Amino acid sequence: MCPVWGVVLWWSQILSLPEIEKELATIGRFVLHHEETRAKDSANQVFLYLWKETLSRPEAFSYPFDSVETVSNICPPDSAFRIFTWQLIDFPSGTHRYYGILVRRWRESKKSSWKVKVLELKEKSEVLEEEDIERRTLTQDEWVGALYYHPRYTTHGVLMYKGQALVPRGSRIQKERLTYYVLLGWNGYDRKRNFKIIETLFFNPKEPDKVFFGAPVLYVGVVPKMRIILPYAETTALSLNKGWYVRKIGAKKRHEAIIFDHVSTSRRGGRVWEDPRPFFGADGTYDALEFQRKKRLEGRKGVLVYKRNVIPYAPEIEGYDPRVIWRQREEATKRLLRYGLTP
């Protein structure tokens, strides 16, 4: 361990938040960019400890930590939690490891004081290989590691939805309000495979100090999924973001949704390769998850419903004028001719 970082740990309880932020930014850059994995592992232990100690302070919940650029830092509109995620890359093998901290904030009534609990997210990378991973609820000790990113066209980095569910409480079935959160993430995994992840997160009102990953609210067919895993090759790209779609080209009505590339499997000679996963990638069509507030499925109301082969809508092209492109092309051609060059 670097002696300087040892001193930081020793004094962390009396340092101000701006001073700790400065140290976190320095260690974070080392963890991400340094070439020696063993040194990064040692630094990451300090990094993780310092985050947990700092975020346990009540005043740290609202502190921005903007200068720690190597760490994703997002929260939902209701400020029920903040989630911090980062990665450690083993450059020789090309594998990625993920670390995370979730700070849960709640209070039992409007008049009671806020309670805060810091939860370390412990990655189990092997769950990505399991066939039933999309249909399992997981705890913070078996987390599907990812860097969660801020969806575009949104004020907050976590998407929040409200619905209802029939929940067993003892011998009775009760109708309860349901708040669940959707995270969009990326996992670099190894030299062959990457993953984009649509993760759901929720809290049990009876156990507010615990977090659960995987709510059965993503309806891809009759049976819901807890999360959606989108594998794709290292050499390809795959989009996953917030946006809109239209039901037909030229339609004016837009439907807000989570839009993502449809994943297809490469084939050779009409047969799937022995391990097709490294060759998954976007096929040029798009899918969507649309929130339907009034939709009721299996006792749930307010769910995300899968839509196949949608037409994405891009608001940035509304003001597109081809005459601007033509004018720019003409001006560029004139400049080339002025210098005796052929366009």
Image (cartoon, grey):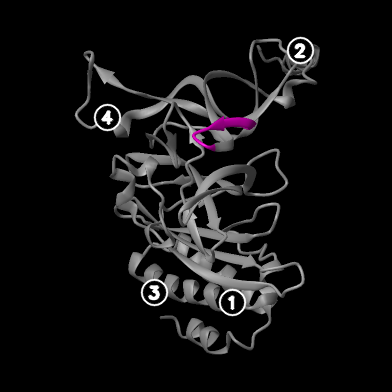
Identify residue type, mark 4.
Answer: Pro
Q: Quick check: marks 1 and 4 in contact, CB under 8 Å?
A: no
Nearer the viewer's eye, disc 4 or disc 3?
Answer: 4
In the structure shown, which secondary structural element does the residue marked by tag 1 occupy?
A: loop
Identify residue type, mark 1.
Answer: Ser
**At 75% across and 15% down in the image, what residue appears?**
252
Residue nearer the viewer, 198 or 261: 198
Q: Residue 75: image x %, image y %? A: 64, 56
In the structure shown, which secondary structural element does the residue marked by tag 3 occupy?
A: helix
Nearer the viewer's eye, disc 2 or disc 3?
Answer: 3
The disc placed on residue 56 is 1
- How far apart are the alpha carbons under marks 1 and 4? 44 Å
Q: Which residues are magenta?
A: 290-299
Q: Earlier in the sequence, mark 1 or mark 4?
A: 1
- How far apart are the alpha carbons under marks 1 and 3? 22 Å
Q: Is residue 173 magenta?
A: no
In the structure shown, which secondary structural element does the residue marked by tag 4 occupy?
A: loop
Nearer the viewer's eye, disc 2 or disc 1?
Answer: 1
Q: Quadrant of residue 329?
A: top right
Residue 70 shows in this picture: no
Residue on which disc 3 sits: 42
Q: Is residue 297 magenta?
A: yes
Q: How many numbered badges does the structure rendering display?
A: 4
- How far apart are the alpha carbons under marks 2 and 3? 55 Å
In the structure shown, which secondary structural element does the residue marked by tag 2 occupy?
A: helix
Residue nearer the viewer, 79 or 336: 79
